[in-house]
Amino acid sequence: MLVRYSALVSVLLASGVSLLHGATIYRESVSGDFSNSGLSPTQVTVGLGSNQIFGTTGNAGSGIDRDYFTITIPANEALTGITVLAGTTSGGATSFIGLQAGPQVTLPTNASTAAGLLGWWHYGPSDVGSDILSKIAIPVNGAIGFTTPLGPGQYSFWVQDFNAGAFNYGFDLAVAAAAATPEPATWGLLVAGLCVAIRRRRTT
């Protein structure tokens, strides 16, 4: 009876917990510079859990190093957070991250408004350790805005710092299952089965 009870508990826990991974999915120093064109961003693959991205932006003397990359959130999953990682630096707390729906960032670099973007944020050292997804979601200066979490689809990012120098950044993109818990009826059956197993174990 104890074996059956343990197995039932395992099923109950597995039904409410998604398998997560935590990994560096792109590091410019290893995988190469991100695309400098919003019309052809670097394709980056994300998975459930933690997806860490590391890069460098700024103006080292040859112009602004803009970084563009695209991710795809699969069906039944969602982007639930973007955390600024330790080691992120900024030229005066004006480093920029923008987000647009689709496989490209079409907003010109000299645009006077953010029209066309879902959202954007000026990040800096004070944001390290914080989730900035809800800040990016605010409709400011023409950006459309959005509600969190972000559901399935393609999303393109634009990262830059126009200040002189090289500035490192790191972002952790959190992806979770859109439905992380069983339907109420399923929970009811599992709990009922667990209670039966406990009663049987006590009688034996």
Image (spheres, rainbow, N blue to C red):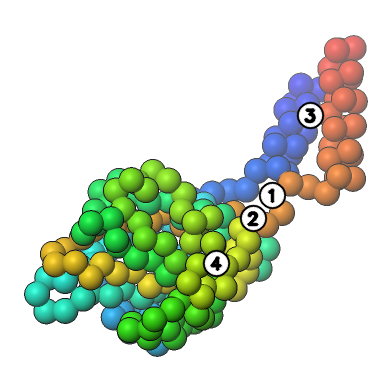
Q: Residue type at mark 1?
A: Ala
Please report whichever mark, 2 or 3, sits nearer to the chain's N-terminal start: 3
Q: CA distance from mark 4 to mark 2?
A: 26 Å
| Visible residue check, residue 48 | no
| Mark closer to the observer (4, 2) | 4
Q: Residues within 10 Å of mark 3 (few under 14, many from 20)?
A: few
Residue on which the image places disc 1: 180
Q: Quarter-wise, where is residue 107 in the image?
A: bottom left
The answer to whether 106 appears left or right of 152 in the picture is left
Q: Which mark is residue 4?
A: 3
Residue on which the image places disc 2: 177
Front residue (pair 66, 151): 66
The answer to whether 138 appears left or right of 12 in the picture is left
Q: Residue type at mark 4?
A: Pro
x, y (%) of residue 38?
Answer: 38, 83
Q: CA distance from mark 1 to mark 4?
A: 28 Å
Q: Residue type at mark 3?
A: Arg
Q: CA distance from mark 2 to mark 1?
A: 5 Å
x, y (%) of residue 103?
Answer: 49, 82
Please report whichever mark, 1 or 3, sits nearer to the chain's N-terminal start: 3
Residue on which the image places disc 4: 139
Q: Relative to 62, is 162 above or below? A: above
Please report whichever mark, 3 or 4, sits nearer to the chain's N-terminal start: 3
Front residue (pair 92, 14): 92
Describe the element under mark 2 as helix, strand or loop: strand
Please report whichever mark, 4 or 2, sits nearer to the chain's N-terminal start: 4
Describe the element under mark 4 as helix, strand or loop: loop
Give yes or no for contact between labels 2 and 1 (Cβ–Cβ under 8 Å): yes
